[in-house]
Amino acid sequence: MLGFVGRVPDCEWPGWKPRTCSDWQCNRARSDVRVHWRWILSGKSRQIPFYPVQACANEGETTRRWSVTSQTTSHSRTWSPVEVESVKPGDHPNAALHPLLFISGPRLGAWAFRKHFLPFFARQGFEVHAMTFPSDRASVEELCVDVELVAASLRQAPILVGHAEGGFVAQACIQRNILPFPRLILLSSLPPSGLGILLLRKLLTEPYQFGRTLLQRVTTYHSPTPTANDAEDTGLASTSMWKKGMFCFVALSKQRASLYGENVLVMGVSGSPMLDPISLSETAAWWETKPVILSGTSDDIMLDSEWNDAASMIADWLHRAEAVDELIRWTRESMF
């Protein structure tokens, strides 16, 4: 497999349908990522070659698994590939809808969205993708590079849907302003101040609950209404831990972010054992919006038995936002 240093490969990638150069991938992402590589390489003694997407599913399958691989040349370190699961839209696909890219927290992976969220939003007409971060990433910057590589390989700029620590990475991607992500959805996400301040606040205010939650969070999630299928999900969660944690927000100015207000959805749960109301309010205030608070569900919304309520709210919000975009496009075309 050939590598491409500092640039996005040509349109006809191995294992992928040929695209025309009028696609978003070729026109927008290629120039943006080229600038991005120069920024990364400045002041750093490493190179990050970009490898083409490798499709693993046969033609006609609804679900496919593929990966994006990049590697460093310094210190003999090779990056593990980023695994992605994709589901085609259902019976009523809408090419005008932006794809959805789900980013999970450290205990989870693409499998966490596979059971409920991926098929649900595919039936809503969205092209959906969920990614699993490898355990060898050493910084938030490297995680953001993974997200940007996957996003640049899609037909159109995706809407980022970040859960827990994955929401933290999604916020950092928006702050970096490398790719034009149209919208951001945060599900029980870490606040912009990061994990360190949150843990310190929990330790000082609720030391017993802090220790109890920390032990439970290694092996399970907290659902008020557990089901028989939770045992399978719990076993998967306990084997999907990252080696690296995130304790600080990316040091970038808020003015660099391009999404605010109606383009950002902040969703949390009441009575969360980990994310307190202060964290949820902080995240919503940072993005200049109001939080949506769910009751009777867990922090791991997509695995909870009440997942459908949250998914329906997200779908309604997405369809309203996409309808507004379509109206704006139609108005511009009519005027000019």
Image: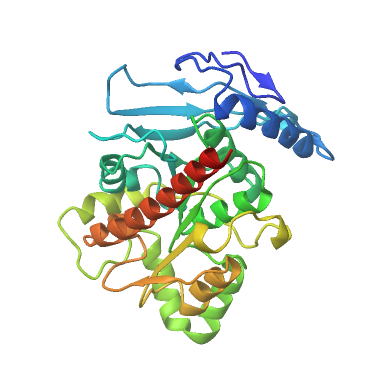
Q: Quadrant of residue 52?
A: top right
Residue nearest the observer in this picture, 200 or 312: 312
Residue placed at 53% from the left, 38% from the top?
333
Residue 29 horizontal/vertical position (percent): 62, 31
Residue 115 horizontal/vertical position (percent): 26, 45
- 272 vs 71, left or right, is left
Quadrant where the image shows the C terminus:
top right
Residue 191 horizontal/vertical position (percent): 55, 67
Quadrant where the image shows the N terminus:
top right
Residue 57, placed above or below residue 193:
above
Disc count in the image? 0
Residue 12 horizontal/vertical position (percent): 53, 13
Residue nearest the observer in this picture, 75 or 1: 1
- 68 vs 250, left or right, is left
Residue placed at 70% from the left, 29% from the top?
31
- Residue furthest toward the bottom? 205
Residue placed at 35% from the left, 40% from the top?
126
Residue 64, placed above or below residue 257:
above
